[in-house]
Amino acid sequence: MNDSSSGRAASPAPASAAAGQVPTKIVRVKHPWRVAFAVVLLAIVAVVVIDAAQRAAFDWPTVGKYVFDQRVSQAAGYTLLLTVLAMVIGVVLGVILAVMRQSENPVLKAIAWVWLWVFRGTPVYVQLVFWGLLSTIYTSIDLGVPFMEPWISFPTTALLNTFWLAVIGLALNESAYMAEIVRAGLLSVDHGQSEAATALGMGWGKSMRRIVLPQAMRVIIPPTGNEVISMLKTTSLVTAVPFTLELYTRTRDISAAIFAPVPLLIVASIWYLAITSILMVGQYFLEKRFARGVGARPDNGPGPVTGAMNAVDAEIAEAAIAAKHGGDAR
């Protein structure tokens, strides 16, 4: 029986079959072991979460009671303030020390090297204990000509309380690490950038501010973000000064009073994680800002002039460098 006799219209033949080609079928590659491993991991996470929710030692009602306690929130504020002040002073000193290390003056270079050697070579806890004993070593801070009667004298305990001693101790230790981070960022910028800026008539300060530092920031910001988060946790050591109003020491004192160490440790951890999350968001936007235009800029190969200048300035700089070297700038 043909199609006409059965009353059905004959279906047209596929185009690939008409052309004599073999039809292909795309089959997705299966990963059974990957799926099985993911299921096992999720099962382990679920078991841990359920166990933690039911374990009496964690005492979640106490965690909920103290996580927003006024004493704890004030301690979190002190911790954040210590972190910000220490990092600001540490970054400023780090930039100065990095410039001193790159100076051609041997005295400046030697002083910067000794500074880094001392503060990187001794534990931060030991340094903080030293700063806590400052009023014992120097009973007063005098202004005047050395080895003569001071013009003005202040008792050390009246001028520097434990909070500022903690800030100074953390900042000086941090400055040594920031100096190396900033120096690495400066070294990452091609030396031709400074030459081009000099050829354009820029002074050292202007070329650093407008040419070198904006490019070095792409290298400086990620490790600086790590240092900020590390500083947040290092503030728990200022009890060595002793400053006892920061987050960890405050929660430890409360836990000793109510005999509940584990719930208060969880409270401190929640606050540390919350502050760290905010700082990481800030780091993300900073990196995004200083990375503008890098991905879109075409790679024209090595050369002393890059996209940090506009086209007119780049042409002037290339011509000036070429004249300086007596030929092609490249």
Image (cartoon, rainbow, N blue to C red):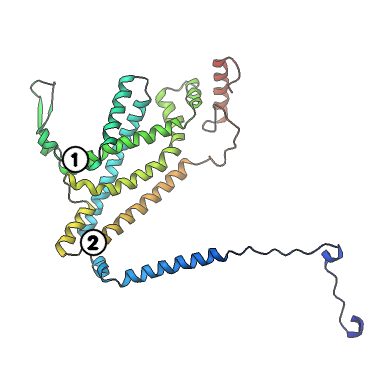
The residue carrying pointer 2 sits among few (fewer than 14), some (14 to 19) or many (20 or more) residues within 10 Å by Cα, namely: many
Which image quarter: residue 145? top left
Instruction: Give the left or right position of residue 221, taking residue 263 as reference.
Output: right
Q: Is residue 37 above or below residue 295?
A: below
Percent across and percent down for residue 65 are: 23, 67
Residue matched to label 2: 264
Which image quarter: residue 10? bottom right
| Secondary structure category for the residue under label 2 | helix
Kindly identify the residue that appears in the image at 21 percent across and 46 percent down.
Answer: 238
Kindly identify the residue that appears in the image at 20 percent across and 53 percent down.
Answer: 249
Percent across and percent down for residue 78 are: 23, 50
Instruction: Give the left or right position of residue 259, taking residue 326 as reference.
Output: left
Percent across and percent down for residue 81 are: 26, 47
The residue carrying pointer 1 sits among few (fewer than 14), some (14 to 19) or many (20 or more) residues within 10 Å by Cα, namely: many
Q: Nearer the viewer, mark 1 or mark 2?
A: 2
Residue 95 vs residue 31, the one in the foreground: 31
Residue matched to label 1: 165
**Which amino acid type corresponds to the residue marked 2 in the rendered image?**
Leu
Where does the C terminus fall, quadrant-wise? top right
How far separated are the C-alphas under marks 1 and 2? 27 Å
